[in-house]
Image (spheres, rainbow, N blue to C red):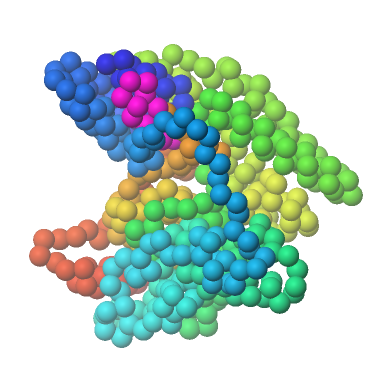
Amino acid sequence: MEDYVSLKSKLEQSYANLAWFASGQSGVDLPALDRRTRRILEQAETDDDAKAGILAFVAGFHDGHFEPVATEEVSATKINPPPQPPFDIMDAISGCAALGYAPVRSIAFSLPLDTLPDASIESDGVSRVFRVGIVQSASGVRLGVVRIPRFRPQDAPPSSCIEKWTAWRKTGQPMRIGALNTQIARDWFEILAGQLRRFRSERVSAVIVDIGGNTGGNDSGDWAARLFTPREVHSARLLLAAAPSANAYFDEELQILQRALDKHPEASVQIQNLLRAAISRFEQRKADLASRDCDLTWVWREQRPWNPAGCSRLIEAGFASGELDYLPNSAIGVQDLASTVYWPAAVDSLRGAWSGPVYVLTDSKTASAAEMFGAVMQDNGVAKIVGTNTEGDGCGFMDDDGLVELPHSRLRFRVPNCVRLRRDGTDEVAGVKPDLPVLPTEGEDTRSRAARLIESIAVDLQKN
């Protein structure tokens, strides 16, 4: 019982999605969940019964990022990490393996599109980063398909890392792992943009981006959306739990902005003013942290309309793209300056590699950064979502892992500390709903559903 009280107190202090789940819009009834959990704990006959009650309470939020973490054994001695691998003498295959470059999700399409009549594969997703193919509807509509199994270059096949590592070794220079990772990340975007340009030359009617089973990754989920349209793409508003983790995030951003200002005294007055304005806003957010404190115990007693500006313990933190939600292409000539206020500036030159219709294929395992991609594509009118509802993980974490350990049971949980808002103001943790639902039906195999999905897209294209 004391652990349960402790957990609820921690959630009130630092769980960014708590006020959302306390609203009727979330579909979760927190007062009922609280009553049920207290009843289970009161009736529990063993510690295991009580632990199961607390775990059921956490599962009742249906937040993929709010999850239990394995309990660690207490060690009486300090454990020192092993030394870094000797990257300078390692061959490319060993080095890339040591850096963790390996596919961690299925490279296959999430539905067997490549088994349909007249389908062809242009890239297998092994020798090149993405699995790519062209499929055709019964009426002859040709559609390009690109599979993104994860939004993190390290989780892709190691081919790009091996190529970059080999080229670096030929220079005779010492390995700089940070710079190497940056090159590989850039290569990930360039390969994707190159494929989209090939789809143009192949005159496909639309592109399907398959993110079924994609469990997330990093900010590339937001950046990648810019490659699929020449139009403006605006990123989601970012809110943080008004907790110490927010203070750490603001400090980090302030350091980055100040460093950029100091490094580029030659920058125009307009750009310097832009950076100073960003610094001023982050300083104001830091100053406002205390004002966002409020008594969130109401969430266990009643439901209130979703209002992040009300008693939510949330504070504005800019956007999922940094301080700005959009920046015109090359508006700031120096890329590292632009990237301090608008992170996707790193892929400015790749914007609009494709300009036609786009459909994003999702399923119940599409989560986190993949939901960010789907949401920003849908909210900006770049793509229609096709398939099924996503998992509902939302933003997750900024800077730290939000770890909470309960004092008696030693149960540990990761508690999300950030929120991304959809264009309609809802919390992205609600998941991304399809514009064209293609749900599994009784007795239907996945190949039949893949064919039905292609026909749904072909019909939608004809309507538009």
Q: Main secondary structure of the magenta part?
A: loop
Give how far across and how far down residue 123 sits, in percent: 44, 79
Residue at 60% x, 65% y: name it.
184
Identify the image quadrant of residue 331. bottom right
* Horizontal relation, residue 29 to residue 132: left or right: left
Image spot of residue 218 (x, y percent) = 51, 51
- Look at the image and give the residue range highlighted in magenta: 405-418
Check the image and report above or below for 276 versus 315: below
Residue at the far bottom: name it.
118
Residue at 52% from the left image edge and 83% from the top image edge: 201
251 relative to 35, above or below: below
Give the percent coordinates (x, y) of residue 452. Answer: 23, 70
Could you tell whether 406 is left or right of 319 in the image? left
Say which quarter of the image contains residue 58.
Answer: top left
Quarter of the image that includes the N terminus:
top left
Q: Is residue 422 left or right of residue 287?
A: left
Task: State which quadrant residue 27 falls in.
Answer: top left
User: In the image, 273: left or right of 306?
Assistant: right
Q: Quadrant of the C terminus?
A: bottom left
Camera sees residue 421: no
